Image: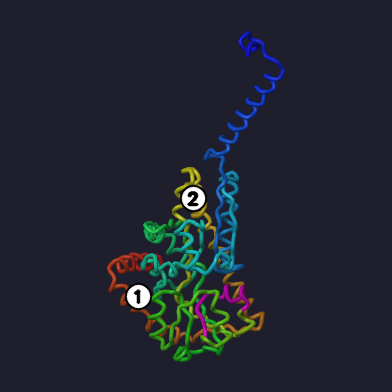
Amino acid sequence: MRSIEAGRWTPALLAAGAAVASLVLTFGAARAQDKPQDKTYVMKIGTPTVNDTPEEWAKLFTALIDKDAGGRIKIELYSASKLGPMAREIEGLQFGSIECAIIPPEFFVGVDERFEVLATPGLVDSLPHGQRLVAQPDVLKLMLGLGADKGLHGVGLYMALPSSLVSRTPIRRLGDVKGKKIRVFASKFQTDAFQRLGATPVAMSLGDVLPAVQQGTIDGAISGITVFNAMHFQDAVKYVTQIDQPGIFLVIEVSKKWFEALPKELQEIVERDAAAASIAVNPRAAALYENAKKAWVASGGELIEFPADEQAAMIKTLESVGDDVAKAKPQLYEAYKLVTAAAQRTR
């Protein structure tokens, strides 16, 4: 103590002081690493399919994020329901255990019934028409805003392809649908449509479809031909009928809890890059659709189209489904009118 009072520092005291200074610097550096501008945020993206447009969207989005976010967002892609069935992924989004999922909007109907409005039969008549529809600002505002009060934050929307019907036995004419058990998306627009065609609709998650077809639990399933190819349906069934209704859309939702924890500049980057990827994926979706049809035939499958008069008869049978389903529910009906008006002006 006398040495301190006298202003003299012994070697031992000098060493102790250096150690304290080092600790202070280390602690300060650690605190600096905790600053929001230096933190890395993990973004797990879940998709229900593999080798399909959701993966293409994710690749486009990842490239943009890597460039714009400077490594502050780390993207991890989990295809083919590796994060769980679609219902579980939606719950994960709401609770914040999953940061992002790319899923047909109909599967969010338990969150908000308006999610299913894009499944209206006859809403779009082609892939380019559907792509024009979801580029409309009022449609985007509606669809991406759904679920905001239930843990969701929409950032992207695009049309992937028209619907196809895979079946154990060939469905060559409209009458062949009668009496069949057909897997549909979780939407009353789809269940009512197939009931009118004389089928028994069965809502089912994608991962359960192929085993159900193989075992004869169902006779066929609605999905996209890109899905049938990627998941090797041709090993079990050979027939795909291009019914083209309804259009298959995909919505990109992020966890609101995760999104709101991001710094503002990263929130803006996520929204901007998701919107850009949702436009950039359109030509890739069109190419995948055309290639999938060729690949189905090349692998020994048969691609069937209804005669023109029967396709027209199907559309005529289904044209009032949307209005009949929606008008009983005021919120859904308002969304239905907005979307159908947008579809008409972009036709």
The three-letter code of the residue at mark 1 reads Gly
Numbered disc 1: secondary structure:
helix
Residue depicted at 40% across the width and 72% down the height: 123
Point out the residue furthest to the right here.
11
Give the quadrant of the N terminus: top right
> Which portion, as a residue range, is magenta?
219-232
Q: Is residue 14 left or right of residue 106?
A: right
Give the quadrant of the C terminus: bottom left
Numbered disc 2: secondary structure:
helix
Q: Which residue in the protein does label 2 denote?
A: 272
N-terminal-most mark, 2 or 1: 2
Q: Is residue 150 left or right of residue 248?
A: left
Contact check, label 2 and label 1, Cβ < 8 Å = no
For residue 339, which quarter of the picture? Answer: bottom left
Question: Mark 1: few, some, or many residues within 10 Å (few <14, many ≥20)?
Answer: many
Q: Where residue 331 sits in the image (x, y, percent)?
A: 30, 66
Q: Is residue 18 left or right of residue 243?
A: right
Residue depicted at 35% across the width and 78% down the height: 321
Which label belongs to residue 322? 1
State the CA–CA distance, disc 2 to disc 1: 32 Å
Residue depicted at 66% across the width and 10% down the height: 8
Q: Is residue 342 left or right of residue 208?
A: left
Number of labelled discs? 2
Q: Where residue 72 sits in the image (x, y, percent)?
A: 57, 45
